[in-house]
Amino acid sequence: MLDTFQAARDHGSGWKDRLGRVGLTGRGALYGVIALLALQLAFGSPKGDASPKGAMVWIAEQPFGKFLLAVMTGALFSLAVWRFLDAAFGDPVEGDQASDRVRFAAKGTVYLGFAITSLSTTIANWGGSSTGSGAGSGDGQTQKKATAFVIGWPMGQWIVGAVGFGVIGYSVYMFKRHAIDERFMKRLSTNLGSVRTIGRVGYGARSAVLAVVGVLLIQAAVIYNPDKAGGLSAALQRLAESTGGPWLLGLVALGLFAFAAFCVAEAKYRRAA
């Protein structure tokens, strides 16, 4: 039985690898559009939705955007399935311990949410309707609703505040792990300096945005106002409103462009997927 299971897993490793590389490319494209929207938010539109949802709506509104969004949807579903397969069988590069599998399952769930959002946006726009791309849409509203739900529990403020500190702690951990220690290079079969640089810059930018999300959660808990919470777009908006915000957000946007490029590079150079 174990031999049969191993043979089936080895036989499927080829298409699993392709799923992963297609998914990583799709993730890179998504972050590239988010970075573009963040740049517009910094120096152009003050109310843009620089969230995954906002990026999908933006793609749909471009020439041939419906077809591009359909391709994006397929890539995101590939990304989710790949991570769920990693949760079931382990990853040849990132490990197969129980903690690794839980992490892969969590990532798969997040990516599945992105894929479903992309699919619904594709369907809505294919028929000629518009999902809207204002600042009130996207991940910000979802974050606010979730925060409002939890903050109403007994000790809800403490829970939301603890989650905020946890998000900040995770952002520091990710910054140390990748932007400083370059742990992402262990996944790759190349030692190119350009790939190393865009990886460090990209992970650094992601960590910075994640830290702002944590700060927003803490602020929502302290003043008992879920409207102060928010996701990626709200965090970027907060950066834009700070002292020197447009330039700071512009730098973060360039960092997100770097992360998008790194995702594509990982799709090419990853040792195995």
Image (cartoon, rainbow, N blue to C red):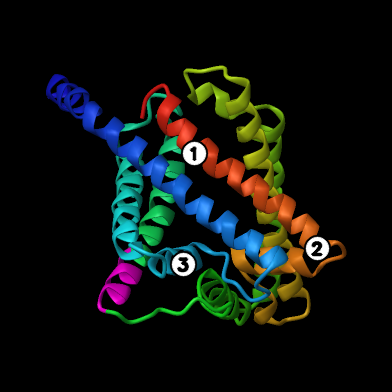
Look at 61% across and 82% down and name the residue there. 152
Question: Is 120 colored magenta in this rendering?
Answer: yes
Residue 143's place in the image compared with 200, above or below, is below
- Specify whether residue 265 is painted magenta: no
Which residue has dot 2 on it? 245
Disc 1 secondary structure class: helix
Disc number at residue 137? none
In the drawing, does residue 226 fall left or right of residue 223?
left
Q: Amino acid at mark 2?
A: Gly
Numbered disc 2: secondary structure: helix
Residue 94: x and y in percent read: 46, 29
Does residue 191 appear in this view?
A: yes
Q: Residue at the spot x=51%, y=74% of the render?
A: 142
On the rendered structure, is 115 left or right of 263? left
* Residue bearing the label numbered 1: 263
Along the line of sight, the residue nearer the viewer: 171 or 264: 264
**Quarter in which the C terminus is drawn:** top left
Q: Are marks 3 and 2 in contact (CB under 8 Å)?
A: no
Q: CA distance from mark 3 to mark 2?
A: 23 Å
Instruction: Name the amino acid type tagged 1.
Output: Cys
Q: Could you tell me which secondary element the residue under label 3 belongs to?
A: helix
From which residue to which does the magenta span run?
119-127
Circle 3 packing at 10 Å, graded few (<14), some (14-19), many (20+), is: many
Q: Are marks 1 and 2 in contact (CB under 8 Å)?
A: no
Magenta residues, dominant SS class: helix
Q: Is residue 142 left or right of residue 174?
A: left
In the current view of this chain or complex, which residue is farthest to the right? 243
At horizontal 31% and vertical 52% (from top left) the residue drawn is: 77
**Residue 224 locus on image (x, y percent):** 73, 81
